[in-house]
Amino acid sequence: MNYVAGVDRRQNIAIIGAGLAGLACATQLAAQGHHITLYDKARGPGGRMSTRRFATPCGDAVADHGAQYFTARDADFQSEVANWAAHNVVARWPDIADDVWIGTPSMNAIIRHLAAPFDVQWNCRAEALVRHADGWTISGLPDCTVYDTVILAIPSEQAITFLAQHDFDMARTAMRARFQPCWTVLLAFEERLATDQSILRDHGPIGWAAREADKPGRSGINGAMDCWVIQASASWSATHLEEDAETVAADLQAALAEALGIALPPPIAHSTHRWRYAMSSGLGEAALWNPELGLGVCGDWMLGPRIECAWLSGRALANQIIENSALAAA
């Protein structure tokens, strides 16, 4: 098979990365009749919109440990969010602002909803792209399917490895991406803390902290436990990037106690994660597309750090592919 064959027909398309950008791209392409397979190295839906389940003596605790909320400013994205709301996978969070939304009952509910119609292969780590006369194969996967088009919907530092072998101009663009890190700590307490505060911003090393139970749609999700997510500021995270996780957890727990103005009981469990590539400043391009090779790239790092940017990037790449397909058939 060859993508630029001069006819408009259904393609067999592989998307590496089943986060929001990859799924937005997949949704648009599938609507045009293309066959889509998505691969992701994670064990399940989420990416940077992930929700973590971690064990405690009182049972499993659940908390968002990636993106905490999102806004919708673009008209097309607003329509998409309205559709998510109709399916009860998002709700407004007026405590933050009138235009703020959150996934329900967790942030990864959005990814689960978008992934449901597709053949998503989780826990699959692509190792390299191999170009053949009739298309692409992807080494490291459990099959040798030949694809007309491959789309990389993964962070730039991962995309560079694939792009450098096939399109150095795209690889060079990906090399320009810059990220800010973020240390995130989830704390579970046996009972609700003695404070009415539920949201903290910009307090010492804390960039953001929130009580999980007080988010929309989260009441009772952790029973009587009180779970908090703490995300360190970008500057603090960068300074302490190579610190060990236990020290970071202790430091951010102490910062939470100071910010709330109370003595915290010992948490019954905690989970710590270092996001090395949490926030991108964006490159000002929606997506990258090479129609001769049938190779494309999308992701929030193309446009900016917001969830909306990931969706817009994936949709933009799909539209480029669809437009190119129509031109080839003309």
Image (tube, rainbow, N blue to C red):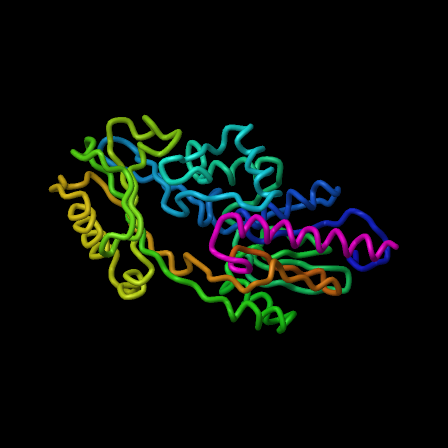
Work out whether residue 271 can be spotted: no
Q: Is residue 304 magenta?
A: yes
* Residue at x 65% of width, y 64% of height: 130
The quadrant holding residue 135 is bottom right
Q: Is residue 89 above or below residue 184?
A: above
Q: Residue furthest left?
A: 263
The x, y position of residue 118, in whole percent, is 62, 39
Front in this rendered view, residue 326 or 308: 308
The x, y position of residue 20, in whole percent, is 54, 47
Relative to 306, 251 lies left or right: left
* Residue at x 58% of width, y 70% of height: 171
The x, y position of residue 294, in whole percent, is 71, 60
Relative to 250, 115 lies left or right: right
The quadrant holding residue 251 is bottom left
Q: Residue furthest front?
A: 98
Q: Main secondary structure of the magenta part?
A: helix
Q: Quadrant of the N terminus?
A: bottom right
* Residue at x 58% of width, y 65% of height: 162
Relative to 182, 141 lies left or right: right
The x, y position of residue 163, in whole percent, is 60, 67
* Magenta stretch in the rendered image: 301-330
Q: Quadrant of the C terminus?
A: bottom right
Q: Is residue 39 magenta?
A: no
Relative to 96, 7 lies left or right: right
* Residue at x 38% of width, y 31% of height: 216
